[in-house]
Image (tube, grey):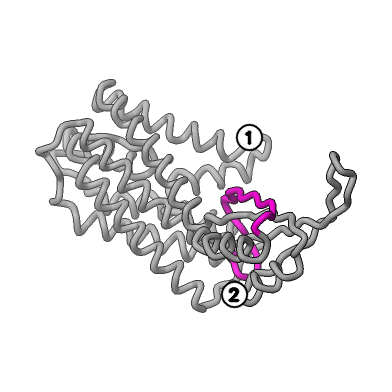
Amino acid sequence: MKENWKWDRRMGVDIGKITLGALLLGFSLNMFFEPYNLVAGGITGLGMVLKELSLRWFGWELPLWLSNILLNAPLFIGGYFLQGRAFILKTGYATMILSLGLYLSSNWGYYEGDLLINTVYGGVIGGAGIGLVLSASATTGGSDLLASILHFFTRHISVAVYLFLVDGIIIVLSILVFGVNLALYAIIGIYLTSWVADKVVDGLHYSKALFIISNQNEEISKRLLEELERGATGIPVIGKYTGEQREMLYVVMSVKETVIAKRIVKEVDPSAFMMITDTKEVLGEGFSEH
């Protein structure tokens, strides 16, 4: 189902995430990757290849901010029909902000570090930027949007496979233009970028699930609702050792709220059994809406 474009508080938060994330990505590419021709896949990686080739063949450099716009523009036409208006508007905005970040930081290259330092810092900062953009249900366009379009016409091949192929072709091009050694460092940068992006996305939606077995469930659930505004679900359980049927409380809350929840349970029933597990993402009232 396609999203409808509607301005509200959530949209404002998303725009803030996209702005900060796209700028961080643009800064990291120009500061750490571009000075040593570390091609980190995607459209910006292809832009680095084109920048080098334009210098060799024509004597002038095609700026990264300009290639990012020119290469992404045709993809938005197809993406509009596949992903919906809201997604394309967000992604188009992210692409423009990324281009702005590339333009503003075009002379910020960090040439004093070695390859490993640039790879690590570029991967971490760029990954944080991408994670913020993804958490707002958008992308910076590029290879993932192209992969989605290709998948639409050949459903038997997944988006992940197309994404791997597209980025793989760009890496091969970087080997031909810049050599194997730089490509190997770039692969490390790609891994770090992906890993940090996943951690940022997971962290923004990180929650805890509590399983509580007590003889004072009514009092515990009442205090959780009053003090944390978190409702609990009662699940019938049977102790296999005693054969006794009891009720287990199941409640989901933020990481910070678990400190208060543990105090409440201990105050009401010091002998209560409580298990706390991680949940990567929770959707619904009181939690993430997308």
Name the disc covering residue 130, or none. none
**Magenta segment:** 270-290
Q: Residues within 10 Å of mark 2 (few under 14, many from 20)?
A: few
> Residue 207 or 69: which is nearer the viewer?
207
Element under disc 1 = loop
Of callouts 2 and 1, the N-terminal one: 1
| Residue at position x 40%, y 51% in the image | 130
In the rendered image, which residue does mark 1 sit on?
157
Element under disc 2 = helix
C-beta proximity under 8 Å, tags 2 and 1: no
Is residue 287 magenta-colored? yes
The residue positioned farthest toward the left in the image shown: 112
Q: Quadrant of residue 20?
A: bottom left
Instruction: Find residue 121 and report its horizontal and vertical position in percent.
Output: 26, 42
Q: How many marks?
A: 2
Prevailing SS of the magenta stretch: loop
> Residue 1 or 228: which is nearer the viewer?
228
Q: Quadrant of residue 248?
A: bottom right
Instruction: Find residue 113 and report its horizontal and vertical position in percent.
Output: 14, 36
> Residue 24 or 279: which is nearer the viewer?
279
Q: Quadrant of the C terminus?
A: bottom right
In the rendered image, which residue does mark 2 sit on?
227
Instruction: Find residue 157 and report its horizontal and vertical position in percent.
Output: 63, 35
Label 2, label 1: how far apart the Cα atoms are:
50 Å
| Residue at position x 55%, y 73% in the image | 5
| Residue at position x 63%, y 54% in the image | 209
Query: In the displayed structure, does residue 267 sit left or right of residue 49?
Result: right
Is residue 130 magenta-colored? no
Q: Amino acid at mark 1?
A: Ile
